Image (tube, rainbow, N blue to C red):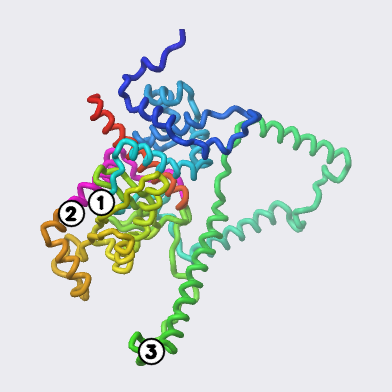
Amino acid sequence: MPPSLQEWLPAEHYAWFVLASVEQMDLSAFLAGYRPDGHGRPAHDPALMVALLIYAYSRGVCSSRMIERACVEDVAFRVIAANQKPDHATVARFRRRHEAAFAGLFTEVLELCAEAGLAKVGMIAIDGSKLSANASQESTRGYEQIVRELLERAEQTDEQEDQLYGDRRGDELPDDLITREGRRKVLADAKRRLIERRAKEERPIPKSRTKRLKEAKRRLEEEHDVHCQANQAYEQWRETGRMKNGRRFGAPPKPYVPSELPDGRINLTDLDSGSMKTLRGHMQGYNVQAACNEQQIVIAAEVSVIAPDFGSLEPMVLATLRELQDAGITERPGVVLADAGYWHQAQMENVINHGMQVLIPPDAAGRQGARPGWEGGYYDHMRRVLASDYGHALYKRRQSMIEPVFAHTKFNRKLIRFMRRGRSAVRSEWRLMTATHNLLKLYSNQIAITGG
């Protein structure tokens, strides 16, 4: 008799919980890309691959090669994979091919949490953290460096073509193709090599560095054009515009002349990533955002390419409302908590207009006294609210709601670096990380209810 996988792990193991959870999820987005007639090479079951990646990220295993190795060495991984051994290329391609579907798993898991009563959102906390990109800061270049490298590559190409073709253009027919018999022989050999290559497993084509250089150059030029246009519009407004009281402006400020060439910098490995300032210095990465409830369930997960949290309050609240609607949750947040980095008065007023109370201190925890100019009006009002017993008690709960989410993700599960590149891919991966966080919380809750 073949070995029974049910005997390999105890009944309460997390692997069985993952398999049961995947059975309840809507995987139509994963199945849509496969032919229903069965033609073509048989693929691994998409439900198996989804469960494998969910379990891997839950255990802090993100590398496709480490997942392949675990399917051989780790009993729980072998149970999840039904004793199959998908190679690392298959895992990586599946994750890349179903990028949008993996982002949608976040909502599927949130629905499971809602069914278990863990998605109460009377009060939510919003915060951000920095995760390293799949790129090094040493790959960051300025505009002149990018142009110089493009010119060097073009010069190298010209030299190679001169050595190869000499005085010829390089597109003339070779000697063996001039005659009819020679053409037939070469075409036959080419067809044979094509058949042999198609018989082998398809490999992903690596992205060209030259194409990344050209895209980086285009982005810097685009940013420079926007900068120049904004400066021109501002100076024109200063000359013809009026203040709120109807009076004209005084003497215009000293004219600002932008530089002729873009002065920005961009990373050539991951063009969307940025230099993020952390307590330990700068790193190349992304600013990941999360909104969670009192049960430490992540309600919304998004990615920002800007290091400061300033300006992310309203987008995260709107993302929370979208996620709740998609998950079929009718409850709406009543109180939004965030630290001083999210202070944005216009966005705070917009959130209040949605029927939610916002508690954000205008002063950072380590600051002595108020910031210059941050006195009176809304600033003093928020200080009085937070100084009251009720306001202080509410805001005090922020840290215990949101900080453990990042601590568990980054330090317990060691998810400190993205495996993929580009904002869309990183967003999909971050939502998968937070979805597995929610699934682990749901598993712990079930274990607590059943007593193990």
The reply to whether dot 1 and dot 2 touch (C-beta < 8 Å) is: yes
Measure how far apart labels 2 and 3 are at the Cα level. 47 Å
Amino acid carrying mark 2 in the image: Leu
Number of numbered discs overlaid on the protein picture? 3
- Residue 118: x, y in percent? 29, 40
Residue 449 belongs to the span the image colors magenta:
no
Badge 1 marks a residue whose secondary structure is strand
Regarding residue 285, the answer to whether it shows in the image is no
For the C terminus, the image quarter is top left
- Whether residue 397 appears in magenta in the rendering, the answer is yes
Mark closer to the observer (2, 3): 2
Q: As rendered, which of 435 and 129 lies closer to the eye?
A: 435
Disc sitting over residue 394 in the figure = 2
Q: Which residue is mark 1?
A: 123
What span is in magenta?
394-421
Return the x and y of residue 150 as percentages of the image width and height: 56, 61
The reply, left or right, for residue 281 in relation to residue 55 is left
Q: Position of residue 236 (x, y in %)?
A: 46, 85
Q: Main secondary structure of the magenta part?
A: helix
Q: Amino acid at mark 3?
A: Pro
Q: Of label 2 and label 3, which has the lower sequence position?
A: 3
Mark pair 3, 1: CA separation: 48 Å
Q: Is residue 428 visible?
A: yes
Q: Marks 1 and 2, Cα distance to the nearest angstrom?
A: 9 Å
